[in-house]
Amino acid sequence: MSKVLTITLNAAYDLVGRLARIELGEVNQVETLGLFPAGKGINVAKVLRDLGVDVAVGGFLGQDNVGDFEHLFQQIGLQDRFQRVEGKTRINVKITETEADVTDLNFLGYQITPQDWAEFVEKSLAYCQQFDIIAVCGSLPRGVSPVQFADWLRQLGNVGVKVVLDSSNAALTEGLKANPWLVKPNHRELEAWIGHSLSSQSEIIAAAQKLRAQGIANVIISMGAQGSLWLSEQGILQAQPPKCENVVSTVGAGDSMVAGLIYGIVNQLPTAKTLEFATAVSAFAVSQSNVGVPDLRLLDPILQQVKINQIEG
């Protein structure tokens, strides 16, 4: 089985809560759903461990509040490759409004020095050669520029590993120039990259095909409740998830989808089956406050409702 590493450069504690609607300028009573050691790559690794895949985790952690992360890694069996740096890992507040979307309040955390970054690049390029798939997920910490990030991604690709990129904003824009093996922007992120709105499926596909044309083997566009599209050398697949009646929190749904994709790839499932499975894992994620699949059998009724279609491109 392929060996998997996830990288989280800007880890975080996720404080997750829920209320009907945020009233700006008012006191809001929020139902607390939990405080979790997180960051996108760590979330992906947590789901993969539940799915029975051996995973290593790397990136940066602030040494001042590292305890809960170390406890999590030991508890679920994640190989710890994280580099400790001065300062604290940040806290992100994620509020799910039952009548609207998730609001993220992402605070600033540790500052990465030039020495920190140089050490990380050197060590990661050495240990990454032990892995087949490296999922690089999330935002950039202070002190790491998008250009530095893209240069490191290119070096990862040159080593011969399959790089999966799931990021946003400038990190995504620059990272796409490094031509990772698989990318998963959402609809809004694809619009930001292309520079204009994409109001139809054909426009989304046309934009995604530009990424394929520049040398990215697998382009997956996630569109929330509208499903996802996967463009590869095998053509274009569309996934439609079942309607979720009991949405607790959409936090981690995208990370769960990345984990489902990697699970299918390492188990050499056909592309359509991989997308079907990833869609089911993502749909299951919104029914809970934290990421994870405690029992694979919970996915069965969702899998039966996922629709996969081949689209003529």
Image (tube, helix red, strand yellow):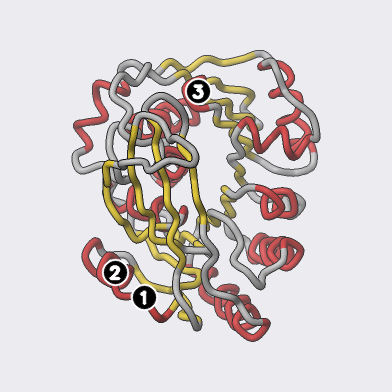
Q: CA distance from mark 3 to mark 1?
A: 37 Å
Distance Cα–Cα, label 3 vs label 2: 34 Å
Three-letter code, disc 2 = Asp
Name the side, left or right, on which 7 lies relative to 14.
Answer: right
**Cα–Cα gap, marks 2 and 1:** 8 Å
Tag 2, which secondary structure? helix
Question: 227 or 312, which is in the foreground?
Answer: 227
Q: Residue 56: x, y in percent?
A: 40, 65
Foreground residue, 73 or 68? 68
Quarter where residue 264 is shown = top left
Residue type at mark 1 is Asn
Image disc number at residue 65: 1
In percent of width and height, residue 279 lies at 42, 29
Pointers 2 and 1 in contact (C-beta within 8 Å)? yes
- Residue 28, located in which quarter of the rendered image? top left
- Amino acid type, label 3: Gly
Is residue 145 at all visible to an observer of this figure? yes
Report the mark closest to the observer, 3 or 1.
Answer: 1
Helix, strand or loop under label 3: loop
Structural crowding at the residue carrying mark 1, measured as other residues with C-alpha within 10 Å and reported as few (<14), some (14–19) or many (≥20): some
Given the current orientation, which residue lies at the most extreme bottom position? 115
Say few, some or many: other residues with alpha carbon within 10 Å of mark 3 (under 14 / 14 to 19 / 20 or more). Answer: some
The residue beneath circle 2 is: 68
Helix, strand or loop at label 1? It is: helix
